[in-house]
Image (cartoon, coloured by chain):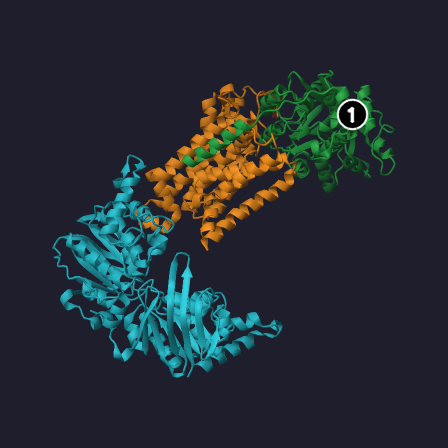
Amino acid sequence: MKKILVILSIFLLLAVFATGAFAAKYSPDSLLGGGVKNVKVALVNEFTLGQWQAQYISGVLSMFNDVGIPQSNIFITDAKFDRAKMISDLKTAIAKNVDIIIINHGAAEGLKPIIQDAVNKGIVVVTVDLALGMDKVVETNQDDYLLAYYSLMNLIQDFGGKAKIGVVWVGGFTPMEKRRKILDLLLGEFPGIQVVANYGRATQNTVGDTMEQTLAVLKAHPEIDAFWASWDQFAQGVYNALKQTGKKIPIYSIDISPEDISMMREKGSPWVATAAADPYELGRIDVRLALIELAGEKAPKFYLHPAVLITQDMVRKLPEGKYLSKKYVSAWGESGKFWPEWLKKLAKKK
Amino acid sequence: MDTLRIKDITLDFPGVRALDNVSMSFKTGEVHALVGANGAGKSSLFKTISGIYPHYRGKIYLGDKEIKAKSPHEMLKEGIYCIYQEVDTSLVPELTIAENLLLYEIVNTKKFNTFSWQTIYDRAKNILKDVGFEKELPNVKEKVANISVAQRQIIAIARALASNASFILFDEPTSSLSSKDVEKLKAIIRGLKEKDLGIVFVSHRLEEVFDISDRISVLRDGKYIGTKEKDKTSPEEIVSMMLGHSLEEQFPIAPHTSEDETVLKVEGLWYKNKVRDVSFELKRGEILGIYGLVGAGKTELLHLLYGNIKPDKGKIILKGKNVRFHIPKDAVKRGIFLIPEERRKQGLFLEKTIAFNIGIANLDRISKGIFVDKEREIELARTMKEELKIVASSVLQFVDFLSGGNQQKVVVGRWIQKKGDIYFFDEPTKGIDVGAKSEMYRIISELAKMGKSILFITPEIPEVMGLCDRVLVMFDGSIVAQMRKDEMDPKRLLAYATGGSKE
Amino acid sequence: MKTTNFIYKYGVIIAIIGLLVIFSGLLPGQFLTFDNLMNIMTSITITTLVAGGVTFSLVVGGFDLSVGSVASLASMLAAGMMVFSVQPAWVAILVPLIAGILIGLSNSFLSIKLRIPDLLATLGMMYVARGIQLVYCRGNQIFSKMNIITPHGIHQAPGTITKNFLFIGQGKISGIPFMIILMLVIIIIGHIILNNTKLGRLMYATGGNPEAARLSGIDVAGIKTIGYIFSGVLAAIGGIVLASYLGSGQPNAGDAYLMDAVAASFIGFTFLGTGIPNLPGTLIGAIFTGVLMNGLTMMNVPYTAQDIFKGLVLVGALALRAFKNK
């Protein structure tokens, strides 16, 4: 036992030598004057599974690249839904003395005290889809209320207010909780809409798990008229299950990706509509907001990323091999938001 | 005539010199026994010659040619074939006798496809015919798993003969054989000698050494002591060469008187077909032997009395009270202790120290409350080490590295300080050297002198005659005879034990 | 031979020191900070507790694969007791502990009475515990004031995860996270039990050679049962700490600890050359992997590739052991 104590005290002793360095203060001029090469950033992800995440993360990385933050200064972690690991990852990011931390999803319960530490150290923190209600943290979100409203209202319209629906949803994620609220609101408004099945789990194999659950649900509830999938990963699972059984039950969902589009475009696809916001642009906006804060300028406390409804007709009109862009969906692509002059210069300079 | 000569063989292991400048020579057409106490270097020498320890220093000559013992396979090519104590290690139990006989050939052939089952069986039969074992192994299609240990050895010998070996080395070949099979093996070895093969024979048992060998070489502490012609020496001389001094008295004549008080009474005990209707009484201060051959049910009987297995029928009466033990713990609580047959498998915690091994049965004695007092634990182990003359650098030595005799003493030492009246010894001298054996006899007779009752299983007639006050002879699960000391006679004992006569 | 012995005995510690030196050289001012070292220690706290369970099962000659699921179950029960049943913190701690005991009893019943091999028996219980957990939470996370969906609609859960309970995983005592202190205390107590008490002797004897233990008058079945109960309880404590650390109950969140725990236990075998399962070794094994994983994360080595290092470390430790046994 003594040996353990010795080892522990070595740990503690070593810690004494370490000094907590404070993040250097930046300004637009110092960033333009080459200071951006010294900016260190971290992207702490709860998970990176699915196309939404892929688009969001590539948006973040492309913006880092555009302004000239060196690759070696970017620190990325993936907790793979393990929230204990996400807490540890966030601590690691802080220990790496980064200037900016972007926190992608996660749960407020365990993260809050650690985020407070980061803020106290002068680190700029931007969150996406994580409700914190903390000062000095820029919180960005997709407009989840509207996403849910668009997709559900589309369903309700199509069925004239009368349908038995299967709901695929999982609790415990901020955006999910918001989407659920709209469902409950609309269920009160339209008593003809009945939820006959309610399921869904976020796992490393969400599509496969959802598919299996859907197959079981289809057996138990052959009367289902439509599915509402609150996440495109769920929608893909339902889609696969329907394809396997050959049933044509319409799917209304939230989020979009190239993969989703190809499924929606397929002949006779039951996936009729999805509500989405552009995750790639959201990623770029989050970086811009962080840089504005870093430069000592004031970024807004909240940012809500606009949602649109994307129907099967719309995606079928896309030329082969093309993805959504401003040309086809006006809410897509470069939003032109949060571009102070110095930031434009910084991006051009590169 | 060919000779196998070894010259100045030295073999080192970390911290130990197993062989120290050993030189000797073996001839074809003779049986050469290699004897020595445990740890004398017999096995090391055997394994060096067989190519298992290629890091030896010194030279090995076959005739005039120097050969290098690099691997068993190399030595086989030179015509030197070794049969290990655990003959099973060189056989595949799930394959047939024929496949095992032709194993090397099957494995090494490049024309595997050309083998047919019939060819294999025919060739196997031919080999057995050539070497003269067709009677011993009549069915070559039998799986090795289903045949006896003796038959397995015959396969190994047949392999050696088939590969034109000129020397066959045996490492304690009789240790796992029944006495009937030992006789058969001796006959086979004599036959091999007549075929002008050289036999080297490592053994513990002087009796069989004197029976079949022509010359006897003695090793002690890794050194070569000497070689004697069998006809010009005596067991006493060989023993004194092994020990380095003459053995004055193997069996202690410690006078002890068994009293009339019955401590343990067994009535009509049955267990499957292993123990049949066994009844007997054990008196205070008595050494009661149980003699019988392998498979007679001796061990099962002890384990029934110890609560390790449950009898189908019958009564066990301990000091006048009917008892029923569910697990050995119940027996231990009532003062019955077992020194089991397989000390490494059933007796010892090999990865633990001497102190742990002794302390484990004496936890109440060495503890304060729930905590083990390590000082008391060591103290107890030291007492036992002295009392039982356990040879070890300290009681904190791991038992795995002790010699067989010292390991056995550790197992005994576990029970000495406990309050108990009955000790079960299951072949306590199996595989331990002569010196340790006589120590063990001394311990047993001292216990009896203290008024403890001893149940002593042994397959060795001298032990029965030398140590026991009374003996029960078991055959096929039943007690077929009881003899007092004055009635004991080797021939009668063996006759009863082999089922030759009924009382 | 002497060098190999030395490496065998102190290998893990040398490796830890080596890693500390390398990482602090590569990551100046980042790696060797008090905060980061505490981060490493917190990240291995739950692993070590669960690994302690595995170690106890190994000591008595078993092998408990259900520990990860038991931790999951315990964390869900702890959260559920407060959120669903509005119980105080002590109930939220007690109930998971009882669950741990019951799983331990089931494991020993299967392996001793029904003679199912330990690995298979505990594998079975792993699924059972996981299933109970998922049924209990209906596959959802459990958090304060969560929405509960029932066939009759949705309503808000009545309870919250209490402040007292959150202290276990989030509180600090003079700057040091309480969970680290708790883990160290438990490991020390466990080590004292194993090394200094009668029970510990009996456990090591039972695991070392069950037949010899039985014939030496030890109630092998009873001792093995106690070993499995310890295992279940330690895993449950791990789960309780996890629930408090996350401030919520996450389905299957404990499962991930199984393999890390097994690795820590086996790396621990080599500690100080004992070659047998022991708790200080388990702790050191967990610290070793913790330091390695933290350093690699900081070096931006992708999470996916880190498993390769973890695997190599385990294989290396086992190889060292095999080499020593030669």
Report the residue at 64% width, 38% height from top.
Answer: C303
Classify B439 as above or below C19: below
Measured from the top left, where is residue A137 in percent x and y? 67, 19
Measured from the top left, where is residue C50 in percent x and y? 49, 36
Measured from the top left, where is residue A49 in percent x and y? 69, 35
Q: How many marks?
A: 1
Chain B, colour shown: cyan
Classify B44 as above or below A166: below
Chain where mark 1 sits: A
- C85 sits left or right of B286 in the view: right
Q: Is residue C220 visible?
A: yes
- C312 sits left or right of B168 in the view: right
Q: Which of the pair B410/A34 is nearer the observer?
A: A34
**Label 1: element kind:** helix
Q: Which of the pair A54/A142 is nearer the observer?
A: A54
Q: Which of the pair B314/C167 is nearer the observer?
A: C167
Q: Is residue A143 visible?
A: no
Q: Which of the pair B43/A281 is nearer the observer?
A: B43
Within-10-Å neighbours for mark 1: few <14, some 14–19, many 20+: some
Measured from the top left, where is residue C56 in percent x and y? 43, 40
**Image-quadrant location for residue A159:** top right
Question: Would you name the residue on which mark 1 appears?
Answer: A154
Q: Which chain is green?
A: A
Report the residue at 15% width, 54% height from top.
Answer: B449
Q: Amino acid at mark 1?
A: Asn
Q: Which chain is orange?
A: C
- B36 sits left or right of C309 in the view: left
Classify B393 as above or below C97: below
